[in-house]
Amino acid sequence: MASHRFNPIRGKWCARHTLWVAIGVAILVTLGSQVFANAGAGDTLKVDVRKRVAPAETPDRAHIVCETQQWDPRQTAIIICDMWNQHWCKGATSRVSELAPVMNRVVSVARDKGVLIIHSPSGTIEHYKDHPARQRAKAAPKAANLPAGIESWCSWKDEAEKKVYPIDQSDGGCDCQPRCKEGSPWTGQIDAIEIKDADAISDSGVEVWSLLEQRGIRNVILMGVHVNMCVLGRPFGLRNLSKAGKNVVLMRDMTDTMYNSRQPPHVNHFTGTDLIVEHIERYICPTIASTVFTGEPPFRFKEDKRPYVVFISAENEYDAAETLPLFASELELKHGLRCEIVQASTAADGEERHYISGMEVLTGADLAVVYARRRGFQAEQMRYLRDFLDRGKPLIGLRTASHAFDSRGSAPKGHDEWVKFDPEVLGGNYHSHYDAGPVATIAAAPGAENHTILRGVELPLRTNGSLYKASPLASGTTLLLVGEIAGEKPEPVAWTHRYKDSRIFYTSLGHPDDFANPQFRKLLINAVFWAMDRPVAD
């Protein structure tokens, strides 16, 4: 299908074949969008969506839930929100320019699979009045089931969302110094994102909804800018489509915020974006990554230089799905790190517990934290962890990581079990544990009192978690903490190790009560910075 580049500055079409454009428009108006309904239709899309759910009994512990959905590409649309050619904020313009070529690749793959692409550069639609994609949106008959408010902005989904909104964007969100002068300099969508004749162009909630209904589209992906303003609030935005019942998701790596890091909560600009994404996952709708179309790691802005910590969460006994997000938030808000949680199923049995997605993020990670128990993941996913360690990257193992990848034969055939992960990587020797109940006292190992990881940690610690039996440790380990319960010999509780060129820290602590203890969190924060060979945070 032919494509036509529009020059928003001149306001004229640069079409090579004017006659072809006229014929295309005539066909479109006559036959409607069904001409293209099956164009490029591909196989079913396997989409891994991520959301955050807060149990009623622990509302402060929103845990991550990942779900795999199968989508028909012909029932799927992508809406590109406000990727303008110029923004009044220079920083925003620069980030859009960096994001746009990657977004175009994502959109191109999606289009080839049969996904409808809707371009929504708000306030500039008149410039596209003669484009076939604009005619397509206008030609859709007005839907009989227009949701209430679909023609208007939606500032808040409800009062509950408003009360917990995580950032202050009241100043307009410009992160530049000096602050840029506000205005409306945009004249169209950035040229780096190609508009094909088979696409649609609209910034109208009524038109977009009608187009979706005409085509039987139930799955909608929002991408573009800015996620804390237009992507959430536009008539075709996340709040409206979510309230109206569409299976809408945000593509979390194909977006940016208007957030000034000098405003509350006074965090890095990109941390502000992460906070909004987390907010959306809990209060608005799930998110996905561009990996679903590209097969590549998620996009990351070049100026996002935060140390990158990836948590691999896959256990069902110690509430890691709830405690790790809280700890990750502490690392983000107080220590300026970037954190990602790759969450597997928390099911106690069944083959689904051995499925995980998203481990490709390890490709760009600075540290991996493993809290998994008796899983045997797909070989293509485990390859990212093995490659990560082969590159000499550091790893922290928490509690059940000592038997993380030994499924005892319950994993499906062809999955990758790393049975010797404990002795080889962690340097441990887990073989059992004492019964739960006796409180274990945790003290520094002789000679370890001044180790960097123990700096500022008030000892002894006490834990309600059962004491693991892990002795003797592998050669080359440095013992840091030992635990003891009445009437039994002491056991190693924390130590460091080397796996090839990788720095390794492991602790058998990690019970939910441990995470509630600020001294344990201090220990773990120290370990995070030690593992990355960075100065330990105050």
Image (cartoon, rainbow, N blue to C red):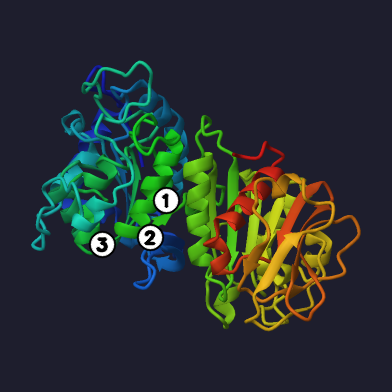
Q: Which mark lies nearer to you, 3 or 1?
A: 3
Describe the element under mark 2 as helix, strand or loop.
Answer: helix
Above/below status of 273 relative to 159: above
x then y, percent, for residue 345:
53, 71
Q: Which residue is mark 3?
A: 246
Residue 73's disc number: 2
Label 3 environment density (alpha carbons within 10 Å; few <14, some 14–19, many ≥20)? some
Q: Amino acid at mark 2?
A: Pro
Residue 110's disc number: 1
Q: In the displayed structure, does residue 129 sit left or right of residue 18?
A: left
Q: In the displayed structure, does residue 447 sit left or right of residue 148?
A: right
Above/below status of 160 relative to 23: below
| Spatial separation of the CA atoms under disc 3 and disc 1 | 19 Å
Q: Is residue 417 visible?
A: no
Mark closer to the chain start, 1 or 2:
2
- Given contact means CB atoms under 8 Å apart, are the residues at marks 1 and 2 in contact? yes
Describe the element under mark 3 as helix, strand or loop.
Answer: loop
Q: Which mark lies nearer to you, 3 or 2?
A: 3
Mark closer to the chain start, 3 or 1:
1
Q: Amino acid at mark 3?
A: Lys
Q: Based on the displayed image, in which of its 4 quarters is residue 409 positioned?
A: bottom right
- Indicate the quadrant containing the N terminus: top left, top right, bottom left or bottom right: top left
- Given contact means CB atoms under 8 Å apart, are the residues at marks 3 and 2 in contact? no
Q: Nearer the viewer, residue 321 or 115?
A: 321
| Spatial separation of the CA atoms under disc 1 and disc 2 | 8 Å
Q: Nearer the viewer, residue 394 or 138?
A: 394
Above/below status of 488 relative to 502: below
